[in-house]
Image (cartoon, rainbow, N blue to C red):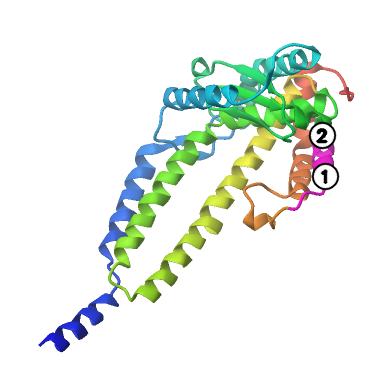
Amino acid sequence: MGLFGNRSSQGRRRGLKIWPILFFGLYFGYYYLSHSNEASFTGRKQLLDTSAQEEAALGLQSYREILQQSQVVRSGKLPEQVQGIAQRLVEAAPKVEKYLADTEGTPANTQWDTYQWQVSLIQSDQVNAFCLPGGKIAVYTGIIPVAKNNDGLAVIMGHEIAHALLRHGGERMAQQKLVQIGSIAASMSTGEMDPGQRQMVMAAIGAGAQYGVLLPFSRSHESEADKVGLLLAAAACYNPQEAPKLWERMAAMGKQKPPEFMSTHPAEGTRINQLNAWMPEAMQVRQQFCGTTPTAQ
């Protein structure tokens, strides 16, 4: 009796439950239909289940925490330079949105009142900058030598501002929510499988989510921010031709990086090729809003 019961239990452990997968599929369909939006500037379909106001509140909270733990440079020529570049880029953003709406038919639905722009220069060797939801910008002094000039710094800051305008932070939160629910569904589906087999299946699902969804999604965000940031810099009357040169300098730093398919960011060579492909449009934007031939600063 006991032996028969053990064999029956082992037999059942090898089964794969289908209903959690079906439930997740139905939930994903509902989620996509009820949370799908058209992104400003690009018209791309994006999933958002947070409001711009909620994202801005989270961005402000994170920004305050970062500044409390950082050495902020509050006076001198460099902070004024960074402030001036940020102001020009922010003023150019609505112009670019309208330009793209008129020329490409993309939606102009940015909720500008949710952006309370603020920029800080942080003393650090980090070669980095960011812009949190709601318009909270930080530039690390370590990136200034790589930027080299105002045009390069405008390209960097335009890229970061584009992340906030495109609401990439909110998209990542929605994506992470779906991945977590999918992982729970997969765990429930494989709950009665042989432990060794279940471990292999879950590892394969995790790798598939990482390399097939999360990383490509992140790289697409970076490319999207590269393009919109390039147009912001051009409309703010900076030289967009500095963008590929910037990434040539980034590549020359020689930092060890994983292969592109394992990275959250496109490789420098990919970014340079994309920027060069977008350059005619950027130069057209530069000509329309500035009316002069750009020169490096």
Disc 1 residue crowd, few under 14, some 14–19, many 20+, Cα 10 Å: few
Is residue 105 visible in this depiction of the protein? no
Q: Is residue 128 left or right of residue 20?
A: right
Which residue appears at 36% of the width and 42% of the height?
33
Decide which of tag 1 and tag 2 comes sooner along the chain.
2
Tell me, yes or no, whether the highlighted magenta stretch contains residue 251.
Answer: yes
Q: Nearer the viewer, residue 108 or 246?
A: 246
From what the image shows, is residue 84 above or below residue 25? above
Which residue appears at 15% of the width and 83% of the height?
5
Is residue 43 visible in this depiction of the protein? yes
For the C terminus, give its image quadrant: top right
Q: Is residue 150 left or right of residue 220?
A: right
Range drawn in magenta: 240-256
Q: Quadrant of residue 99?
A: top right
Magenta: main secondary structure: helix
Residue 47 spot, x, y in % from top left: 44, 39
Q: Which residue is mark 2?
A: 146
Residue 234 spot, x, y in % from top left: 76, 25
Which residue appears at 52% of the width and 53% of the height?
213
For the N terminus, give its image quadrant: bottom left
Numbered badge on residue 243 = none
| Inter-mark Cα distance, 1 to 2 | 9 Å
Q: Nearer the viewer, residue 96 or 121?
A: 121
Residue 18 spot, x, y in % from top left: 28, 66
Q: Nearer the viewer, residue 126 or 273?
A: 126
Secondary structure found at label 1: loop
Q: Quadrant of residue 72?
A: top right
Tell me, yes or no, whether the highlighted magenta stretch contains residue 48.
Answer: no
Q: Which residue is mark 1?
A: 253
Q: Label 2 near label 1: C-beta < 8 Å?
A: yes
Q: Quadrant of residue 175?
A: top left
From what the image shows, is residue 232 above or below residue 255? above
